[in-house]
Amino acid sequence: MGVEYSPIRVSTIKPQKKLTFDLHIRFKEQFLLYLKVGEAVDRDKLKKLKKQKVARFFIDSNDEEKYQHYLDDLLDAAVTDKNMAASDRADIVSGAAKNAVEEMRENPSSKKAYKATEKASKGIIDVVKNNPEMLKELFKIKSEEDVTLQTAVNTSSLAVRMAQLKGMSEEEIEAISTGGLLRDVGITKMDKKYQELFSKPLETFTNIELKIYKTHPQLGVKVLEELETVPQEVLSIVHTHEEKLSGMGFPRGIKKMSPSEEIVSLCSSYDRLVTCLDGDPKEAIKTIGIDELGNYNLDNITFLKKMLKDDGLI
Ligand SMILES: [Fe+2]
């Protein structure tokens, strides 16, 4: 029987760190051994691969556990290693989070994937904490693939930063981080042709598209409820992330949100403009200040704007 290969994200491999598994690349439908266990990727070579938009390495499926350990080690280092460059820190945390969210979408019933998401969301909390430069580094990472994975990380980190600056509790911040990452996990239950809606402006939707798009928060809750271990706070953030205080949101059109729910919804609206629709950050926050007036507390919109300015994003 031939070897089975699993794709792994290039951004999760760190230069100069010894590999605990063989690394392969795909070339013309073939898998070629790129580096052997015990070797390390050269920094310049890694940069070149990223520039060539090579997004994936491949590993022997039997090495998946070794890879998970390698990733855990890196995530720990990203949080604790004081000498690590901010850009490496951001790369690792973002890569781990995207891996986890992608895994949640592919295997929504996997407890392992949810655990990895929780771990990545803690990683986001830890690197963002007291690090005014981290948001900028995270937003610098241009998505090499699916923007819906990039916006998961960006929304989560924005909302975490906002909650930390507002002095919210650790429990609230954890729910915000995980909820932010998984807000659009319902995408996995949608027909492929409707998944593109996540990177299209709402105004261009047909009636049927709008109707289907509006089901995604509820679908996300359904996916997570099946795991039976997801905290209520996370479920409610996923459920309400498209709601507005004016009652003009969806799926329920409620007019009340908890502070955590409002922060995630606000950061989600902002990041949809910036990451999903590739908008200019300055224009995006201006748009939020006009179009979303009444949808969120003005204090929160002002707070977000000041935070973006202070952290160098606008
Ligand atoms: Fe959404």
Image (cartoon, rainbow, N blue to C red):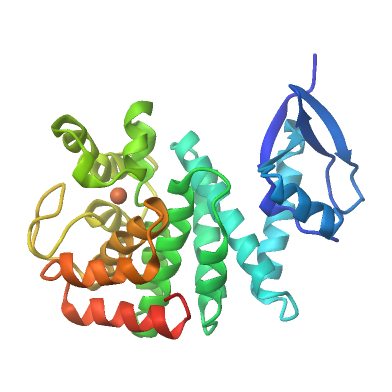
Q: How many marks?
A: 0
Q: Nearer the viewer, residue 148 or 53?
A: 53
Residue 105 location, x and y as percent? 45, 39
Q: Nearer the viewer, residue 116 or 53?
A: 53
Residue sitting at x 83%, y 58%: 44
Q: Is residue 311 above or below residue 207?
A: below
Image side of residue 11 versus residue 259, left or right? right
Residue 291 location, x and y as percent? 16, 64
Image side of residue 57 versus residue 132, left or right? right
Q: Quadrant of the N terminus?
A: top right
Residue sitting at x 25%, y 65%: 261
Q: Quadrant of the C terminus?
A: bottom left
Residue sitting at x 50%, y 71%: 125
Image side of residue 190 versus residue 47, left or right? left
Residue 294, picture quadrant: bottom left
Residue 130 location, x and y as percent? 52, 85
Residue 103 location, x and y as percent? 53, 41
Instruction: Please indicate, yes or no, whether residue 303 appears anywhere in the rendered image.
Output: yes
Residue sitting at x 84%, y 51%: 19
Instruction: Please indicate, yes or no, whether residue 126 appears anywhere in the rendered image.
Output: no
